[in-house]
Image (spheres, rainbow, N blue to C red):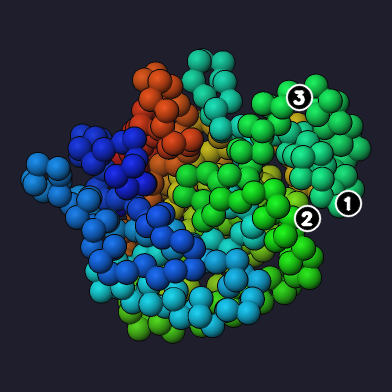
Amino acid sequence: MRQTWRWFGPADTISIQALMQIGVEAVVSALHHVPTGDVWTLEDIRKRQRDIAVLPDGKPSGLAWEVVESLPVSETIKTRGADWEQHISNYVTSLENLASAGLEVVCYNFMPVLDWTRTQLRWPLPHGGTAMRFDLVEFAVFDIHLLARSDARSDYAEVTASAADQAFSKMTDAEKSALCDNIVAGLPGANDAWTLADIKALLAVYAEIPADKLRQNLYDFLGAVIPAAERLGIRLCCHPDDPPFSILGLPRIVSSPDDYAALMRAVDSPANGITLCTGSMGVAAGVDFVGFIKDWGHRIHFAHLRNTTREGDSHQGMHSFFEDAHLEGQTDMVAVVRALLVEESRRRAAGRSDHMIPMRPDHGHELLDDIEKGSMPGYPLIGRMRGLAELRGIMAACA
């Protein structure tokens, strides 16, 4: 597999020089400064390529931007709003500009309103490091008491709602503000940052969009952009919902192997593909990753290899979880990597030019010097280096 690393641009706390020392083979990046729905210009794309390929002293880094994560899909597209056609046109223009710059793999997601969601960004671990965590009671505090969503309480088991009541009664204003910021303000790579008022307004829009309609909106989006992707030689790959269950009463439509199977069949094109994220899908119990890769590996264009551990009781598929070490969570990472290597062998035998699947270690723990550096939550240096080293070991053993 192609060993890549997510880099957030010049503002990232980790330099391109550090990536050279880590030994990654390519870079995953995006133009986070461009407002969602606007065109990514060729000039901006070329600048990001230079930021990666050329060091401050003018010497080549030997690295290149190879995977786009993410070219965000606007809420206008997701809801099929009044300016849908213009947003689709802008998306296609961005794809054309990316193709002109030589980029071929474009990751995106179709999560309504909130992108990937956590309640704690630096949850203390027993060994002294930190991890990101989704605590169901804390999220219920946000939903029932801070956002005060109508009928929110009915979405939770009574034991969870009661625990949220007790927790809220003891929270300081600073703790309430921090919880809101963690959930609403946006995480690294998130499409947008919202206020509570924004969230409430969007929830009112989505009240008229059940899961089947949102799914059709996704199919309509792909129906409009996949012909352009095919023409341009671009492979789009949809990232799964994170977490893979409904939050804030919003529908989730790309959460399971069955969801992906429906998506692949609905728009049956090699340009319509999958971002395999073991951390997101693995939050749900019983996911057969090996079977999924056997069935749909030919449509996997990108892989996020990370691990999670579920905690506590589940209610309607919802539960707490935290980001575990790459080899210590509830997903059998050895089996996943072995299955992906088998898929790569199939591709080589078939003569596919994309036989090597780009992957990256994801959502590492903050460890050692990471803790003092204020890295982007989920994207520290040492924690991800540990994950990449472990994944390299599996790859070497399975080769």
* Foreground residue among 358 and 28: 28
- Is 263 displayed left or right of 138 in the figure? left
Classify 17 as above or below 81: above
**Few, some or many C-alpha atoms within 10 Å of disc 3 (few <14, some 14-19, many ≥20)?**
few
Name the residue located 34 percent from the left edge and 42 percent from the top edge. 11
Q: Is residue 135 visible?
A: yes
Image-quadrant location for residue 157: top right
Q: Which residue is mark 1?
A: 151
Asked if the residues shown at circle 2 and circle 1 are in contact, with their CB atoms under 8 angstroms apart, the answer is yes
The residue lying at 66 percent from left, 71 percent from top is 79
Query: Residue 25: which disc?
Result: none
Q: CA distance from mark 3 to mark 1?
A: 22 Å
Q: Name the residue tied to disc 3.
A: 171
Q: Which one is nearer the viewer's eye here, 241 or 248?
A: 248
The residue drawn where x is 84% and y is 25% is 169
Q: Earlier in the sequence, mark 2 or mark 1?
A: 1
